[in-house]
Amino acid sequence: MGPKEERIAVYPGTFDPFTNGHLSLVRRGLEVFDRIIVAVAKDSGKNPLFSLDERVDMIREVFRGQVRVDVDDFVGLLVDYVPKKGANTILRGLRAVSDFEYEFQMALMNRKLKPSIHTVFMMTDYRWLYISSTIIKDVARLGGSIDGLVPEAIQARVNQRMLERRASLAEEAPTP
């Protein structure tokens, strides 16, 4: 019997910003997988608050010292990226039934494109069911507290970016 093969999962997303829900999923994923690669997507079709490099840097800061978590960025098809990293599993989180339809479609398309890659779904911890990166940005943009909803290393950066955006909007506003 040869050496046990390392079980690697790729956890992809835009992560703009990375939330405590994302963090919880990585931690729980480490109970199943030997290593998790947090793969930050460049091509999201979204208008991100943070650049790709900023998102990667922030997530690396969250996992500094955690040898079982790698943070990387990727461009293009996820099913092309996954095998390049020595993995055959995509890890995805589900918050509610509304997430399932989209995630199911993506998993089936990925399976059609590359049948050797599996998608594993984990339910989000109940404490994080209601949060998403979009909700976090909306609350912060409107001056609300995001305390306890994102890792501390990221919270100050989100708040600072929102202050910069509000200041920029104030400068652009026409004077009466």
Image (tube, rainbow, N blue to C red):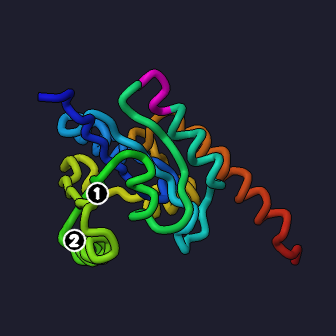
Q: Residues within 10 Å of mark 1 (few under 14, many from 20)?
A: many
Q: Which residue is mark 1?
A: 92
- Image location (x, y in percent) of residue 164: 73, 52
Residue topped by disc 2: 100
- The quarter of the image holding the N terminus is top left
Dot 1 falls on a residue whose secondary structure is strand
Q: Are marks 1 and 2 in contact (CB under 8 Å)?
A: no
Q: Position of residue 112 (x, y in %)?
A: 28, 77
Asked if the magenta segment contains residue 33, the reply would be no
Majority secondary structure of magenta residues:
loop
Query: Nearer the N terminus, badge 1 or badge 2?
Result: 1
Tell me the SS state at disc 2.
helix
- Give the mark toward the camera: 1 or 2: 1
Q: Quadrant of residue 12?
A: bottom left
Q: Which segment did they paint magenta?
A: 62-66
**Residue in view at x 35 percent, y 56 percent:** 131
Q: Look at label 2 and name its amino acid.
A: Phe
Q: Residues within 10 Å of mark 2 (few under 14, many from 20)?
A: some
CA gap, disc 1 to disc 2? Answer: 10 Å
Above or below: residue 83 compared with residue 159: below
